[in-house]
Image (spheres, rainbow, N blue to C red):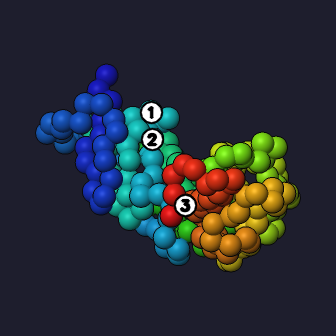
């Protein structure tokens, strides 16, 4: 039995399914054309995924289209998934059931609505040079998050912080160590992003890489 195959993807999407070559389709075989439109805030990813009856995945751009071509008559389920965290299918389910008759072109449309991400975070790395070092490590304070312990050369990941400026403070720093650039320091949480933050500490005689 002949089955539907991926025909084309338009927009900025890439074809994921195997066997992407296409052949001319007899007139008694149908075609399913899927169009996706995205509105609202920019999505945090540049493609979504579509499947036909749970198989034959295609990638499609947030404002793009894809086609399945060359299948027999019957009922098929089109599923749109792998949306960015800040996006949902607007107003209707993320799947459509369609009935294909001979030679028909079935149009399936999904509307996606994306909202502004409401949280973000930091990826904070602490780097210590010089001897001796503060062997018991430090306390790391970030506005809006509980106090954490961090090593002299280590990193911590923060998620779910409110957008905006946050104070990052290194506490329990030994008297023979100093934090480069001041302590605390201000860093900005960007919605949906993990902002990289490096805190450099010089201890003792300050030997090691310079604190730039």
Q: Earlier in the sequence, mark 3 or mark 2?
A: 2
Between the C-alphas of marks 3 and 1, the distance is 53 Å
Q: In the drawing, what numbered circle is on residue 211?
A: 3
For the residue pair 23 and 160, the one nearer the viewer reads as 160
Q: Which residue is mark 2?
A: 51
For the residue pair 43 and 101, the one nearer the viewer reads as 43
Location of residue 143 in the rendering, given as x and y in whole percent from the top left corner: 79, 69
108 is higher (above) or lower (below) than 14: below
Q: Is residue 31 left or right of residue 195?
A: left
Q: Residues within 10 Å of mark 3 (few under 14, many from 20)?
A: some
Between the C-alphas of marks 3 and 2, the distance is 52 Å
Q: Residues within 10 Å of mark 1 (few under 14, many from 20)?
A: few
Quadrant housing residue 89: bottom right
For the residue pair 200 and 73, the one nearer the viewer reads as 200
Q: Which residue is mark 1?
A: 55
Figure label count: 3
Q: Is residue 3 left or right of residue 76?
A: left
Q: Residue at x 18, y 35 (%)?
A: 21
């Amino acid at each position: 039995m002949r089955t539907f195959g991926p025909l084309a993807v338009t927009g900025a999407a890439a074809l994921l399914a195997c066997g992407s070559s296409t052949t001319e389709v007899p007139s008694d075989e149908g075609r399913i054309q899927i169009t996706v439109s995205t509105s609202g805030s920019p999505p945090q990813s540049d493609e979504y995924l579509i499947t036909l009856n749970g198989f034959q995945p295609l990638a499609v751009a947030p404002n793009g289209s894809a086609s399945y071509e060359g299948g027999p008559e019957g009922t098929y389920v089109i599923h749109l998934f792998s949306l960015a965290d800040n996006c949902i299918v607007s107003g209707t389910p993320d799947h459509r059931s369609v009935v294909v008759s001979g030679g028909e072109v079935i149009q399936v449309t999904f509307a996606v609505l994306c909202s502004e991400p409401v949280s973000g975070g930091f990826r904070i790395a602490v780097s210590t040079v010089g001897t001796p070092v503060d062997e018991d490590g430090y306390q790391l304070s970030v506005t809006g998050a509980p106090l954490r312990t961090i090593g002299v050369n280590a990193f911590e990941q923060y998620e779910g912080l409110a957008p905006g400026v946050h104070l990052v403070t290194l506490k329990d720093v030994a008297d023979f160590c100093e934090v480069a650039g001041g302590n605390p320091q201000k860093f900005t949480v960007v919605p949906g992003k993990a902002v990289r933050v490096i805190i450099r500490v010089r201890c003792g005689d300050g030997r090691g890489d310079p604190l730039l």
